[in-house]
Structure formats: C-alpha cells, structure tokens
Amino acid sequence: MVINLSRENSILCDWVAELRDDSVQRDRMRFRRNLERIGEIAGYEISRQLVYEEKEIQTPLGISNCRLLKSQPVLATILRAGIPIHQGLLNVFDKADNAFIAAYRKHDRDGSFEISLNYISCPDLENRILILSDPMLATGSSLVKTIQYLRAEGHPSEIHIVTVIACTVGIEYVRREVPTCKIWCAAIDDELTAKGYIVPGLGDAGDLAFGNKVQM
C-alpha cells in the first residue's frame, strides 16, 4: 500500500514546495524543520492505524476512560539524511524505541554503485511495529537492504516506510521485495536518472540538511 500525503490539499504541500525550491532549501535549518514537520504528519497518520486499548485514568476529580496505544513502535532511520524526519516521528511517538543504520552509496569508476551498510543499532524487533524513515526513496535498494539487515533482529509484525519524495521505480521495487509494507510519502515523482537520482526531486537531502560530504 502506498499513501501519498499530498494527494489532498494541506499545509504539507507548502513544506514540500519549500524543500524543492532551490532558493529556499539553502536555509539548512528551515530545510531540516520541514523534514521534521513532514515526519510529524506521517507519524500522526500512522498512529490512526495502530491498535489502542481502554484504560481508566485517575484525574484530580474522578475517573476517565481513555484509549492508549497498546504497544510502542520501533522508529528506525538511515543515517544521516534520515535524522530530521526521524525526529518528527519521535515527536509523535515519544516513548518509542529507536534504531539507527548507516547506509551509503559506494560508487564505482564506471558510475555504478552498491549500497554499503556499516553500522546498525537496534532493539529486538520480533512482532513489533517498525517505522523506517529516509527522505528519498529513489531506487529503493537502500531501504530493501536495510530491512533485510533489520530482520536479523527479529521479524516485525508491521513495516511502515516514511519518505518525503518517492520515485515510482523505487516504489515498485520495494513493494516487490517487501510486499506487506506500507509506504507513506509526501510526493511521488516518475523520473529516475541513470545515476539513481529522482527528477525533479529536491537534490541531496543529506547535504542540504547537514552540508556537503566527500564521495566514498
């Protein structure tokens, strides 16, 4: 299942436009904050699909029957670009456990690349709800490989992927490799370059949020 959060008009459409706008996105703090706010919206929408249980809560004046989230999810993100959107999700699920994965494109001289994962910190995932975030879903390779690595820590009961810009090619690949996952995105673009970049996209989310890096 794919949920495009900008399919209907909302303030989220403004945030996506600012993330794409070459003249606005140069403000790193604003860029990070827009990613964070999209994470908050996605977290709220995901929360509406989770399981709740009733509990009696003592107030200063009496008893209130409230509904509480039955189990906390695990929030995972791919470093470094995923940090702001992860923070947005954490603002919503503030009691959640967290997982962090370092993944990057290792480029070859011929222009091709492979996904290299060299760090993972993760709690037990067995029968838990996993929410994995990464701002860009381009080819889908890094997300699929990350999920494969995470499954070594247990098999989640649900997998939600949160991204800002998704490419149709990447969506199809992820759905083929992880058919039970739900993909939450703020926009969908159709074009993917030979080097694996989304067009029109927004550029390199990690660089825009945290500064340029040396290519590995």
Image: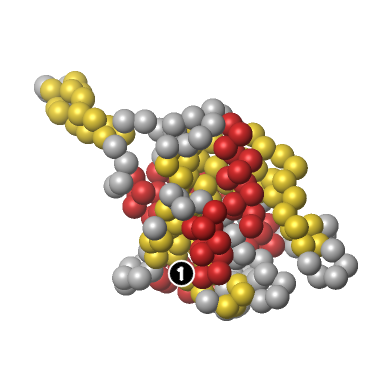
Q: Callout 1: 10 Å neighbours few (<14), some, many (20+)?
A: some
Front position in the image: 90 or 128:
128
- 154 relative to 194, above or below: above
Indicate the amino acid at tag 1: Ala
Most extreme residue toward the right, as rendered? 109
Residue at point 52% right, 47% down?
A: 132
**In the rendered image, is residue 132 in sight?**
yes
Query: Where residue 18 sits: x, y (%)?
Result: 51, 72
Query: Where residue 133 sits: x, y (%)?
Result: 53, 51
Front position in the image: 118 or 92:
118
- The structure's colour scheme is secondary structure
Q: What element carries label 1?
A: strand
In the rendered structure, the answer to whether residue 2 lies left or right of residue 26 reads left
Query: Where residue 66 sits: x, y (%)?
Result: 19, 31
- 13 relative to 93, above or below: below
- 22 relative to 85, above or below: below
In the rendered structure, the answer to whether residue 185 lies left or right of residue 29 reads left
Residue at point 44% right, 65% down?
A: 186
Residue at point 42% right, 37% down?
A: 157
**Residue at mark 1:** 187
- Quarter containing the N terminus: bottom left
- 63 relative to 175, above or below: above
Quarter residue 52 falls in:
top left
- Quarter containing the C terminus: bottom right
Residue at point 49% right, 58% down?
A: 175
